[in-house]
Amino acid sequence: MEPDAVPSTASVIRSGEYLIVQKPDGEQSRVVRFTPKQKILIEKLKFSADSVFGKPYGLFEVSNNQCTPMSVDRLIEELHQQEAPVATSLGDSETTTSEVTDSIDPRLVIAPSALKLEPEQKRQKLEMDAVLEMKKQGISGQELVAKLVQGSASFQTRTVFSQSKYIKRKAKKHNDRVLILRPTIRLLAKAYYLKDPDRLAMLRADQLALMLQMAGVHHGKNIIVFEQTLGLITSAVMERLGGKGACVHIHRGAVAQSIPCVHSMNYSESTLSTFLPVRIKCLLAGSQLPYDTNRRPVNEEDGEDNENDEADKKNIDKLEDQDQEALSRRNDRLDREKQGLDIISEERAHSLIIGSRTVDPISILELMFPKLAPSSSIVIYSPHQNVLISAYEWLSKRPAINLMLSDQMCRVMQVLPDRTHPLMAQYVAGGHVLTGIKVIDQ
């Protein structure tokens, strides 16, 4: 359950939300923020974002750049059709092999080897122009696939397995349906992993689940996180906390950047209250914030208005409103940073999670390990094993027990009647996870 991803009363798609867009059995999965008058493109399927506002999440059918929700009755009817034999389900069951061969060019019948060497389009009676014209007229993907099968000169000569693969391949290419889903941690991990696994440090969803389990993340805990995984680890921790506890996000720079997974979850104010970003230079400087002495109240006036010129006064008021808004955000950021520094300095952190891609985990351990509470869990992830071996040796010389370095392999398998094989185009190897527990030094 994800009660705080979006309000529980929101059961329909709203403008400004981040959503997961993918085609059924598609190879892509995109994270898109839906705004008015926006055109969404996913695997050559294009539709308008305005057509889905106010409609429930789920499966949609695209026609003329407009989305229509799929009804349950229609899906059940199509499921029954798929269970029927291939020939009868496509409405061409009376076509025999001899009738199909009669319609083939005689030159191909004389030289069967030429049939294998010719491109597949040459064996298709339905021209590409006709396919494009039918798409413009709004024909459904299922009807288009049926016409392509009827126009195939070699369909009836195929085996049952080959016919099934042919239909699936054409349905995947001309599919006019799209899934619009509410973001979850698993869907975000899948989307960014498929898009660019290197930016995610090769972190898979199963390894992320292992990290959360070994770190003991649950309601009310104080977790320190340093990560380079686009905010995926931080977002997963915030979701687990459920509005109670603290996720102290250690980051470089003035503000926390490169955390799209946190913004994409559409978190409520209750969940966002647990997000406490802390700059590394503040940890090095101690409890004193670098610009804490320059803090000003939000309603403080910076100067006098020009009473003689009304136009200048309006411009000044507008600039002052913008300054006040920026000052309010800065003060809120300082308050959150102060809370995070207090948790670290008072040794109230229960776990430390490091998701490193280019930063040496030992540099973070040297800074944070002395400030962890006794019995705190330590979880370090990295796509490079040699980095974790060095961290293992570093922890073995400190008061830490139950040190364990592990890796996981995940491979997608296709399991169908009479044929089973792994998916060829996939990333098999991921990263490595180092876990341990801090104890009292005696």
Image (cartoon, grey):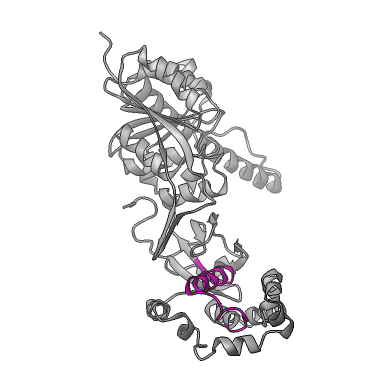
Front-lying residue, 141 or 5: 141
234 shown above or below 75: above
- Furthest toward the top, the residue is 442
Q: Position of residue 73 (x, y in %)?
A: 37, 80
Left or right for 375, reference 176: left
192 shown above or below 283: below
Does residue 289 appear in the picture of this structure?
A: no
- Furthest toward the front, the residue is 110
Q: Quadrant of the C terminus?
A: top left
Front-lying residue, 150 or 137: 150
7 shown above or below 351: below
Which portion, as a residue range, is magenta? 150-178
Front-lying residue, 437 or 372: 437
Residue at image position (54%, 33%) is 255
Q: Position of residue 368 (x, y in %)?
A: 41, 20
Q: Position of residue 13 (x, y in %)?
A: 46, 64
283 shown above or below 357: above
Magenta span includes 312: no
Left or right for 327, reference 211: right
Q: Position of residue 232 (x, y in %)?
A: 46, 41
Residue at image position (52%, 64%) is 23
Residue at image position (45%, 55%) is 421
Does residue 421 appear in the picture of this structure?
A: yes
Magenta span includes 161: yes
